[in-house]
Amino acid sequence: MDTSAFPAADCGPALAATSLLRFATAGSVDDGKSTLVGRLLHDSKSVLADQLEAVESASRSRGQDTPDLALLTDGLRAEREQGITIDVAYRYFATPRRRFILADTPGHVQYTRNMVTGASTAELAVVLVDARNGVVEQTRRHAAVAALLRVPHVVLAVNKMDLVDYDEDVFAGIAEEFTRYAASLGVPEITAIPISALVGDNVVAPSAHMDWYGGPTVLEHLETVAVTDDPSDDPARFPVQYVIRPQTPEHPDYRGYAGQIASGLLRVGQRVTVLPSGRTSTIEGLDVLGQSVDVAWAPQSVTVLLADELDISRGDMIVPSDAAVTASQDLTATVCHLHDTPLTPGARVLLKHTTRTVKAIVKEIPSRLTLDDLSQHPEPGRLVANDIGRVVLRTSEPLPVDAYADSRRTGSFVLIDPADGSTLTAGMAGHAFADAVRDAAGAESGREADDDGWDF
Amino acid sequence: MRTAVTALEERENPYALSHLDALESEGVHIFREVAGEFERPVILFSGGKDSIVMLHLALKAFQPAPVPFALLHVDTGHNFPEVLDYRDRVVAQHGLRLHVASVQEFIDRGELKERPDGTRNPLQTVPLLHAIDSNRFDAVFGGGRRDEEKARAKERVFSLRDEFGGWNPRRQRPELWQLYNGRHAPGEHVRVFPLSNWTELDVWQYIAREKIELPAIYYAHERTVFSRSGMWLAPGEWGGPGEGERVEQRKVRYRTVGDMSCTGAVDSDADSIEKVIAEIAASRLTERGATRADDKLSEAAMEDRKREGYF
């Protein structure tokens, strides 16, 4: 098989290399999220004629005069029947500068788990606010989920500016309140943009109604925001997915460890430790899908060859010997419960972390977070669907878990029901979010948080 | 206070992956997850461009070892000869194993009935589920992409199917980070879509970059066709053309490859991959809207077929 790439220039401008941005939208039911998504797709010319015709025809058959752009995104029978979005949908569009994967998440309170799902892979979240209502509980909830999931960039889209006479003071007040709140939760970068999704102001084209605004449109920002961190800053983590052993006449002794680099860089010659065994070796070769390289980085899928014959299998993790992670059977995490069956102390579950699945017991549920006001309820007894809470877990084998604050990839896990295989709970290891929430809640209520009440 | 932060110009970052590299890495990761967690996976292979790209990713994911899965082709009996020829050459070239589930055999045995409109695409579900069941396949790779259709936009990468092969959108498992959950009960299986996040243009750009050979019908060629419901269909033993449908010679190509009875050709001069990419980038029609009759049966045709076990 010829797997060699040839220069993009050979195929003209349509083949120019572009980058990929994954982002999520969040907004309350009437904030105009579907209109914003529809407008982004429509004005970036990503809605093709036959899709628009289908929407027009469906709108007509419902007795509507104008095409309902929400029908572009609400695809399932139940959604169209009820006029609501019940699940995350993924949308794709492109400009000459970038490809976009949009996780279109429902805004209903009871679907917090869907926003968590959409935000888990997002590099940017767009939080919608109705300019007439300003920052409301739901806005705070969205900011908290974005902070909890550590989405690196947040855009505050202040929508319906046409209904407040495009007033700069209205926008500035909302932007200031949101920015202060989200920053205190630990959201690293916040960009506020005044828009009207219905009219099209500052979504794709700059607004003619807001001379006072000098910033980017939503699409411009999506196209230009920097989303790749420097992987050389992070310790390398390589969960072994699969061992490649051809045992063919051409490759009788080949033994390669296949996987996707979760964080950092790997180099030929690097001294590495295999977890959980603790044995060490040296990287002798690196293959990026058929091409031998000296260095590879996250999130490339690669094959690692080691100098020594070690007993390594799926679920092991290869890390630099000078930047290893301690494997432990005790795990404290913030979780979002996803399933209709509640999570209770004493529950026996399966825990999937990177490529390893182990048995685990829920030892304690010390607290549950109320996203509305970031208040915390000690010893809630159980977590029901959409609850966010703190759990203490004991696993049957030691796991090399990083803090989620340090690595979204090696700090995350899911809990699985061993009886029927359902995905129960999404988990983020470590304590970092607790401190941010405590500080934000303290600042918000204008009082010092007391230690007993804010151990979340 | 920052009311608006000027967007950062994207820095020159030597570690940034192109979108094709990012999608390729993700697809390979999905193949390896399945190889690590399932007993009897199989790749559904139609000879269409998406399944060809899927196979290419599988070859890359496990090299220098052979692909650890067999292929499964659901043969409607109305396939394009160019596609069957391509299928057999690929299987021989890479030393793969091929299972064929034949719609014709089910019709001959009286287990399926020909539809009045002659379309065999909806009939594929029965032989597909039979093949999955009788071979005890527990993971079935499909080339479906979320950009194809609004029901597919809601599809997970790992999609649990019940013992009847059915898809229940309300019972889907949430899918977070890259942590795919492949747990299933005996009799159930998981459909896996490594190209979930690819678009039609991504697929074509990748085919160009990797210099992947395709069946010739994807490129513009002179062909005998006739018009039905606004589409150019190929005449054949499946029953076209009907009365009053006039056959003519046109320069066409195919954007999707399925059953001859429901896959239409489009007028095109694009006889090279560069021209195909330019044509798709400028097209105002989706590939399914342009060329697939099966999706036009009702507003939720795809969702309904998926519930019954279709991809």
Image (cartoon, grey):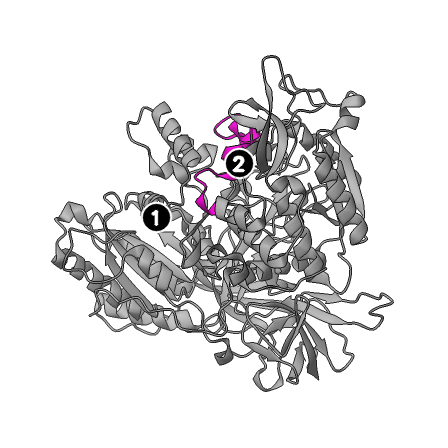
Residue B180 is at least partly visible in this image: no
Q: Which structural element holds mark 1?
A: helix
Q: Position of residue B173 (x, y in %)?
A: 55, 48
Q: Position of residue A76 (x, y in %)?
A: 47, 36
* Residue B185 lies in quadrant: top right
* Residue A272 lies in quadrant: bottom right
Task: Identify the residue under disc 2.
Answer: B288
Q: Is residue B223 above or below residue A254?
A: above
**Quadrant position of the C terminus of chain B in the picture:** top right
Q: Is residue B163 above or below residue B20?
A: above
Q: Is residue A293 left or right of residue B91?
A: left
Q: Position of residue A33 (x, y in %)?
A: 32, 46
Residue A208 is at least partly visible in this image: yes
Is disc 2 surrounded by few (<14), some (14 to 19) or many (20+) residues within 10 Å? some
Callout 1 amino acid: Leu
Q: Residue at x 63, y 59 (%)?
A: B28
Is disc 1 surrounded by few (<14), some (14 to 19) or many (20+) residues within 10 Å? many
Front-lying residue, A295 or B256? B256
Task: Identify the residue under disc 1.
Answer: A40
Callout 2 amino acid: Arg
Residue B292: say if magenta: yes
Q: Which mark is residue A456?
A: none
Q: Is residue A144 above or below residue A115?
A: below
Q: Residue furthest right?
A: A249
Q: Is residue B188 above or below residue A11?
A: above
Q: Chain of mark 2?
A: B
